[in-house]
Image: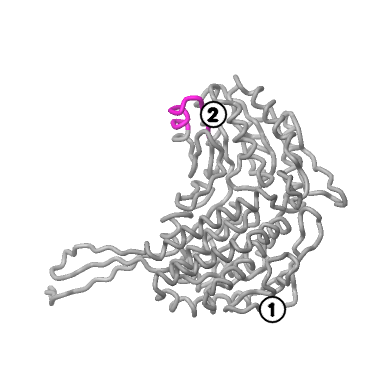
Amino acid sequence: MPDSYAIDDDWNALYVDGEWTAAESDETIAVEDPSTREQVATVPAAGEADVEAAYEAAAEAQSEWAEAPPGRRETLVQDALEAMQAHSEGIAELLAAEVGGSQIMGETSLRIAADQMGEAATMPRRMKGELADSNVPGKDNRVERVPRGVVTVISPWNFPLNLSMRAVAPALAAGNAVVLKPSSNAPITGGLLFAKIFEDAGLPDGLLNVVTGSGSDIGDRVAGHPESDMVAFTGSTPVGRQVAATAAENLSAQAMELGGNNAHIVTADADIDRAVDSATFGSFVHQGQVCISINRHVVHEDVYDEYVDALVDRAESLPVGSAHDEDTIVGPIIDESQRDEMLAYVEETVDAGATLETGGETADLEGVDDSLVVRPTVLSGVTNDMAAACNEHFGPIAPVIPFSDIDEAVEIANDTEYGLAGSVHAGDLGTGMDIADRMKTGQVHVNDQPINDEAHVTFSGTRASGMGGYNDGTILEQVTETKWVSLQREPREYPF
């Protein structure tokens, strides 16, 4: 394969046992640029025989890698980080071409991925054991932390680089082998790109295997393969439930980040300018295609009109267009099915009595038929049961819901099956913290918005938003397990 990281390179190969190899069949998956609607690449559609080869290679390579010194595994991740950063411009262009990522999205993805790799590089030296006194005379107890074996990573399309890296890098650093199955909408930046990065870093053969293919064809086999000791999945709750059930049949450990319906609460005494600043970023960055983006704006009735007017002004000022235009803030939705679903939610919400303040339609792009760019949308007069509020719309849509007191705001925020993220703006910090404590989410940000990710801080959700977690010691615990080793130093007396 060519050394460059360009979209027009030949990506039509799987990566198994350290080799770029053809899939068992001639079937392929077309990669379409969401901005231009043109096919820009082709990747293989792997079959079950390819999946078997990937797991066989991973299982065979893992035992030797587990014995590698911590410094060797640390150096590998650091070298991979250098390889990624050396090609950062090309990777940003790949994100634009494959998933419609704007310049801001590309820069953010690279920054977070680098942070995750830096954190992962510390993990080999953090796999420390402990000693425990024994109730048996002359016995020593030692508890070790060891790699699980083979880690399966099933990654999404929205932020494919960092949402894959947060599992791949820690798994390898901790002494595991990896089988990576990226989304069919991001097979390069969520999968094959990783093979290139770690190959350039000198990764031993078999430790990272990438199989691109349809979830309907190979998803169950990947999630439930008997060689899979741990499954890391990021995606929707319905698919996550299926993956979790399949993995559970194999008794695999799991880290699952699933859907969200995140509330942004704004109290009567909040700084409205700051609240709207946060809201604009939290709703519209990467077209709202973020699991932790703002799904509902919950605003006190005394400042409701002021907030809506300000948010409309900000929404209408955002540059929309092709992800290849460096001025674009709101680019294309990933595909027409996602676009049509979110626009249907808007239509249903208006039909139910809400007011469309701005947006609710696509923006024309020169030379493009059937544009995927949805204009930033603000809806007022929304209630929690309307379509754009009760569903994870996953788009540049801001439903604004009024409330009269704090108890009502908290009730609205928690009235969902999800519990991923949230945010609060309050003039009094104590009130803001009290509200945050009452929100049933895995993460809450006071005087900010919910799109935050720092590799040294645990990232997790509650309820239907998942189980397990990522980052820091949380992901280290997920990709490792404990082993009790005892040593009887002197003869032991037994009862018979």
Q: Amino acid at mark 2?
A: Ala
**Stretch of the chain drawn in magenta:** 424-435
- Please say whether residue 431 is one of the residues in the magenta stretch: yes
- Please say whether residue 328 is one of the residues in the magenta stretch: no
Residue 61 seen from this side: yes
**Residue 304 location in percent, x, y?**
63, 23
**Residue drawn at x 45%, y 52% as measured from the top left:** 456
**Residue drawn at x 74%, y 28% as measured from the top left:** 355
**Residue 427 location in percent, x, y?**
50, 25
Q: Amino acid at mark 1?
A: Ala
Q: Earlier in the sequence, mark 2 or mark 1?
A: 1
Q: From mark 2 to mark 1, how far is it between C-alphas?
A: 55 Å
* 477 left or right of 236 in image: left
Label 1, secondary structure: give it. loop
Q: Which residue is mark 1?
A: 22
Label 2, secondary structure: give it. helix
* 78 left or right of 321 in image: left
In what quadrant of the picture does the C terminus appear? bottom left
What label sits on residue 409 in the rendered view?
Answer: 2
Name the mark nearer the viewer: 2 or 1.
Answer: 1
**Residue drawn at x 55%, y 41% as measured from the top left:** 450
Q: Residue furthest top?
A: 302
In what quadrant of the picture does the N terminus appear? bottom right
The answer to which of 24 and 194 lies nearer the viewer is 194
The answer to which of 477 and 245 lies nearer the viewer is 477
Query: How many residues crowd around disc 1 within 10 Å: few (fewer than 14), some, or many (20 or more)?
Result: some
* 147 left or right of 36 in image: left
**Residue 410 location in percent, x, y?**
51, 31
What label sits on residue 266 in the rendered view?
Answer: none
